[in-house]
Amino acid sequence: MNDLTRPERLQIMLTQEELAALDDWRFARRMPSRAAAVRELLKRGLEVDGVQLADGKMRSRDFGVVESPLRSNGSSADGEG
């Protein structure tokens, strides 16, 4: 991509654990910024085959970066799932 202008802004909210995971990944790869790390992770994620698609019933909170111990067995913390 030669056009380096990025007129669109994307804001996301992360937990402290998610931010720590992003920063750890970024620093281990010597990425220049969080934005660069997020773009690289998005690029890698979009190239992956076998990704489970959302079923239309999931909420934004169901898509986390790091897996919570309460959710590791496929059930949510509130008993749904």
Image (tube, helix red, strand yellow):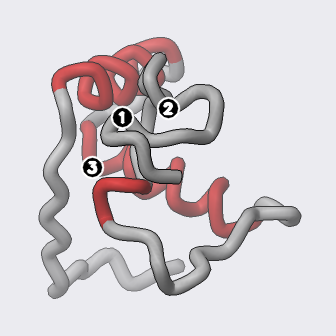
- Does residue 75 appear left or right of residue 12 in this picture? right
x then y, percent, for residue 55: 60, 80
Q: CA distance from mark 3 to mark 2?
A: 27 Å
Q: Amino acid at mark 1?
A: Ala
- SS of the residue at dot 2? loop
Query: Which kind of residue does numbered mark 2 sit on?
Result: Arg
The residue lying at 58 percent from left, 27 percent from top is: 72
Residue position for label 2: 71
- Residue denoted by label 3: 35
Residue 18, position as x, y percentages in the image? 31, 30
The x and y percentages for residue 54 are 58, 75
- What crowding class fits label 2: few (fewer than 14 Cα within 10 Å), some (14-19), or many (20 or more)? some
Which residue lies at the image location 75% right of the left edge and 63% below the top edge?
51
Q: Where 39 falls versus 30 (above or below)?
A: below
For marks 2 and 1, give the CA distance. Answer: 6 Å
Closer-to-camera residue (60/48): 60
Q: Earlier in the sequence, mark 3 or mark 1?
A: 3
Q: Amino acid at mark 3?
A: Ala
Look at the picture and state if 59 lies above or below 75.
Answer: below
Identify the residue under disc 1.
Answer: 77
- Tell me if residue 75 comes above or below residue 18 in the rendering: below
In what element is the residue under mark 1? loop
Q: Quadrant of residue 37?
A: top left
Residue at image location 13% in from the left, 64% down from the top:
11
Residues 18 and 43: in front is: 18
Horizontal side, residue 33 vs residue 51: left or right: left
Residue contact at pointers 2 and 1, CB within 8 angstroms: yes
Q: Image quadrant of residue 75? A: top right
Mark earlier in primary sequence (3, 2): 3
27 relative position to 73: left or right: left
Q: CA distance from mark 3 to mark 1?
A: 30 Å
Secondary structure state at the residue bearing disc 3: helix
